[in-house]
Image (tube, coloured by chain):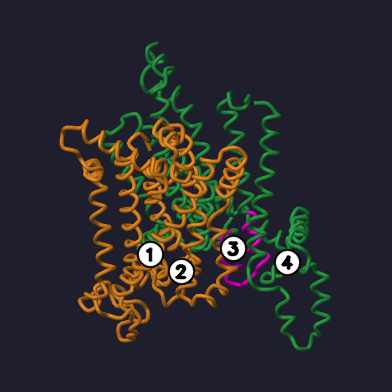
Amino acid sequence: MAGSTPASLSADAVVAQATSASRPRKPVSPAAEAWRRFRKHRLAVVSLGILGFFVFAIVAGPFLWRVPINDVDFAAQTAWPSWTHPLGTDDLGQDLLARLIYGGRVSLAVGLAAMMVSVFVGVVVGAIAGMASGWVDAVLMWVTDLFLSLPQLPLLLMVIYLFRDALKAAFGVEGGVFIMIVLVIGGLRWMPNARLVRAQFLSLREKEFVEAARALGASRLRLVVRHILPNALGPVIVAGTIDVAAAIIAESTLSFLGLGFPPDIPTWGRVLFDAKDYLDIAPYWALFPGACIFFAVLSINFIGDGLRDTLDPRRVL
Amino acid sequence: MSPTYVLRRLLLSIPSLLGISVVLFTVLAMAPGDPFGDIVMNPNVPASVAAALRAKFGLDDPIYIRYLHWLAAMVQGDWGFSFQSRIDVDTLILQRLPTTLIVIGASQVVAMLVAIPVGVLAAAKPYSLFDQVANTLAFVGFSLPTFFTGLLLILIFSVQLGWLPFVYRTDLNTHGLAYLADEIKQSIMPVMVLGLFQGASLVRFVRSSVMDVVKLDYVTTARSKGIGRSRVLLRHVVRNAMIPVVTLIALQMPIVFGGAIVTEQIFRIPGIGSLLITAILANDTPVVMAVTFVFACLVVLFNLIADILYGWLDPRIAFR
């Protein structure tokens, strides 16, 4: 949007000069201020460490642990954890550590991608509803409420049941399932984001700084993108973090029900699904992927809580 | 609470049901695959017969006409025939529905029994040790996916300790008290899995709701009249703090149904959730559609109940 209206550009420069002149003490950058507040939430900082470990493991893991995920070894069926197989093996003697590292990539990628879908749709719908008001707002909010009262998991299962084969044919097994799961999970989770953004827009668009920008001749689009949206993003970032956790749970639930990724893509939920019939002889097989999902989701939720303290200090919950 | 309020709420739920049916039908209509695909491919069926069949079943009609036909059939209770079980879909669902409702109902009771006392106590002394422990445990509770807690409980109580059965049976051959004991024994794990998950997410809502109400003037008035702290909390605060919690319980119903599908699948409970999974794995489209629609109706029903409860708890709303 930069440079679309010269009047606003010069206004920005004037404002920037004014603030730097009126503030003699050393300015603290917003990022440093945010980090200072985030640090006070001890569990969130610990969680950041745990999540960092997970990210490191799934990025660097395949280079450090060079066992293939589908190396069938019938001599080592359901072998308990040992030095050759630190997390044990499954019923085909495949190494669980390698499979969980690979599965972590898929699970976290699904979580991030689905979050982006839900945040994108939520921001677009919420921004349009918040700016338009009138009947557009009413219709969009009715649709949002309608989607909120849809039963998500049954609908998710139904959509996957109906579209599975077509998408597999179009994008290949892995790509098709990935695109479908991301779109469906994201497409059923945007409603809270839309409501958040709309509420923010309704209050922000009446603020003086927006009025000032409008008086300087900023277009509607510029108002939204440069002035209102950046100020509305705090709560959206918090909700987006929680969305990642929810999407990871949704994906593992689908895989656990045997309706997510196919068996040759060992996501954490899929490994758990395969392990559930061997609880008596190989409990470790179910415990490790379950613990991965739990710690990933818990740390993301705590980080979200820490971010709420940082970005959205007025809210109680 | 006036009857007109209840009636108005009832009428307001009709558009949402219609909206949900439109969404479901659109998904079904957009899906690839043709119910007459096999017939078209069959060389023994002449093209003119296939076309006549399509016309007879209205497959070539415009989409809104097909929707109206489908809707009329659904309203009249004609939900189709299950390819898999060889009985009418509505009979099949009515057989399975009570089990699901009992499990969900019992788990909601567990959730409230856990969440309300813990949330109120945490809000009574905010930032105390109890509050912090409760908050951390709540995070742990709703970060543990239901399928993992279910497996953990089976591992501990069925495999290791051998105390509880891990398969839900409907053909118990005991009677009287022994039957009741068996029934409780086999329901305790699924109900706990669902109830604790739901309770964990409710605790934080109860806490923040109580903390909002404690600040209000009427609470200060009650305290200054000399009523004791705990009495004010229990008699004056909790009642009003429950009002938003009722809405939240209703709003969380879609998530609860998701959890119910998972727990029914783990513990092999013959409810409509496991029916949905079986139907999907067996390509039984009429059952898949009907179960999804039943879940949607249940969500709308619980929202309606919450609205009516809301009017009863807070009479100011009913007069608006």
**Tags 4 and 3 touching, CB below 8 Å:** no
Of residues B260 and B208, which is closer to you in this image?
A: B208
What amino acid does circle 4 point to?
A: Phe
Disc on res. B276 = 3
Q: Chain of mark 4?
A: B
Answer with left or right where residue A205 lies relative to residue A293: right
Nearest to the eye among marks 3 and 2: give it.
2
Indicate the amino acid at tag 2. Phe
**Front position in the image: B68 or B7:** B68
For disc 1, the marked residue is A109
Q: Position of residue A70 (x, y in %)?
A: 35, 81
Q: Which amino acid lies under the numbered mark 3 shown in the image of this protein? A: Leu
Can you identify the residue that label 4 sits on? B81
> Is there a contact, CB below 8 Å, between mark 2 and mark 1?
yes
Q: Element under label 4?
A: loop
Q: Amino acid at mark 1?
A: Ala
Judge by depth and name the residue closer to the eye, A186 or A250: A186
Gap between marks 3 and 1 measured at Cα: 28 Å
Q: How many marks?
A: 4
Residues at discs 1 and 4 in contact (Cβ within 8 Å)? no
Is disc 3 surrounded by few (<14), some (14 to 19) or many (20+) residues within 10 Å? Answer: many
Q: Which residue is the site of mark 2?
A: A178
Tell me the distance, in whole angstroms, between the alpha carbons under discs 3 and 2: 22 Å
Say what secondary structure mark 2 lies in. helix
Quadrant occupied by the N terminus of chain B: top right
Does residue B200 appear in the picture of this structure? no
Q: Please give left or right for residue A166 compared with residue B207 in the image.
A: right
Q: Is residue A188 above or below residue A235?
A: below
